[in-house]
Amino acid sequence: MSPSSIEKFGGCWVLMDRADKAGDNAEAFYRYLVSEKKPVKPVFVLSRKSPDWERLHNDGFHLVEFMSKDHFAALANAKFLLSSHGDRFIARPYHRAEYSDLINYQFVFLQHGVIVHDQSEWFNDMMPRVLVTSTPKEFSSVTDACSGYRLTSREVRLIGIPRHDSLLSEGTSAKKDTIFIMPTWRQNLTHIDGIEKKRKVNSEFACSEYLARWKSFINSDKLRELGKEHCKSIVFCPHPNFADYIDAFEPPPWVSTVNALDTGSLQPYFARTSALITDYSSVAFDLAFLNSPVIYYQFDRNSFYAGHIYKVGYFDFDRDGFGPVSTEEAAALHDLEAALLGKEDTQFPARRRDTFPFRDGLCRERLYKEIEDLSFTPRA
C-alpha cells in the first residue's frame, strides 16, 4: 500500500489466463482494452518463465510476474481481477488471514470455454462477481433455481467470451486444411507441483488406458489414409496439463504436434480445422462456433466422471453434441471419414448453428459494458 504502488496500480484491472500461459480470453480482452483506448489501467499477470512472456512484452503489455510483490500490490489496488481460469491460486492467491482486509477487487470469471459438465462445487467455492457465459443452455444450467450453483442472474451474464471475436474473423477466411485432435485431461492422472501450480503426470499415466487409446488413434493407418486422401494435415494437441508429455503418445512422422503451453494461441489452428476429434473437451464449442464438424471419441465414458473434478451436467453428448459419439477407434474414424466427405448427419450442423446467439464480433464490447456498469454498482 506504499504511495508508489498506489500510483502504479491504483484502480487497475488485473487480467490473467493461466499462470504459465496466455493466449486465452484475458489476453483477448486486454488487447481490446488497449486497442480501443478504454479509460482503464490494465495489467497482465504471467509467470516470467512462460514462453508467452517475451511475446507479450514485445507487444507492449504491462506485465506483472505471477506471485511477485507487484502481483500482490496490483491485487491490493485493483478494481477487478478478470481471468479465464478460476483456480483458487488465481482468484485468491493471497493468505486470507494476512491480506483479506486489503483485498477489495471484484472477480470476473471470463471462463476458458463453455460449461459442459456440472462444476457447481468448484464454482460455489469461487463465487465470482460476474460469470461470462456463451449459450442460453449454459446460462440456464447455472442460473436455474434447481441447479446446484449458488450463482444467479445477478452474477451470470450471457454475452459470449472475448476470444470468439477474433476466432470469428480468423475462421471466416482461413483455408480448412487440418484434422485437429485435442482430447481433454484426466485429474486422476496428475498432481499439482511447484509455486506456479503446474500439473504433472503421476506414475499411473504411463500405463493408463487414456495414453494407450490416444497413442493408438494417432498412429492409426486409417487416420493416415484419410489425411492423405483428403489433403489434410493431421495435428495432435494434448490438453495443456499434458502438453509436456507429447512424446509419451509416440506421434508418427505424419502427425504434427502442438504444445499448447508453447503456442501463443490455438485459434489459428481452430480457424483451419476441417474436423475436430476430441473426447469431452469444451474446445468442441470453439469449432462448433465456426460450424466445423466434431467427432467425440469417448472410450472411457463410463468411468470419466469418477476420475475427474467434473460431474454430469446439462450437456448430453448424444442429445446435444455437435457430432457423433463413438466408444471405439474404428467407429470414430468412420465418423471422421463421413465428416470429411460432407456426409455427416444434418442434425449436427443444425445444432452448431443454433447453439450460439452471438456471432457478431461484439463479445468484448458487451463484456466491457457489463464491467463498466459494475463500477457504479455497490457490492451487496
Image (cartoon, grey):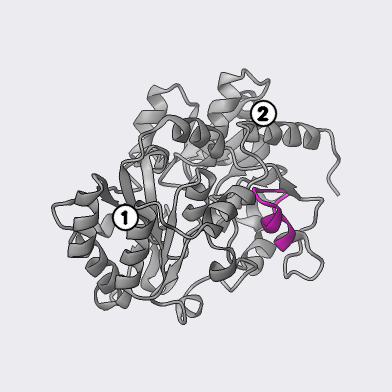
Answer above or below: position of 191 versus 132. Answer: below
User: For the residue marked with disc 1, what is the amino acid?
Assistant: Ala
Question: In the image, what residue type sits under mark 2?
Answer: Gly
- Residue at 44%, 58% (x, y): give it: 344
Secondary structure state at the residue bearing disc 2: loop
**Which one is in front, 6 or 59?**
59
Residue where numbered disc 1 is placed: 243
Question: Residue 346's spot in the image, x, y percent?
Answer: 52, 57
Residue, x 65% and y 61% (percent of image)?
123
| Residue 103 versus residue 223 in the image, above or below | above
Give me the disc on residue 305: none
Decide which of 180, 186 is in the foreground and name it.
Answer: 180
Is residue 140 located in the magenta-colored stretch of the structure?
yes
Q: Is residue 230 left or right of residue 313?
A: left
How would you rate the neighbour count of disc 2 (Cα within 10 Å): few for under 14, some for 14-19, many for 20 or more?
some
The vertical placement of 67 against 331, above or below, is: above
In terms of secondary structure, where does tag 1 sit? helix
Between 258 and 284, the one lying in front of the other is: 284
In three-dimensional space, the C-alpha distance between marks 2 and 1, rounded to whole angstroms, equals: 37 Å
Q: Looking at this view, is 194 or 239 the one in front?
A: 239
Q: Which residue is drawn at the image coordinates 74% and 31% (left, top)? A: 369
Residue range corresponding to the magenta coloring: 128-141
What residue occupies the far top of the structure in this picture? Answer: 37
Q: Which mark is residue 10?
A: 2
Q: Does the magenta-highlighted stretch encompass residue 144?
A: no
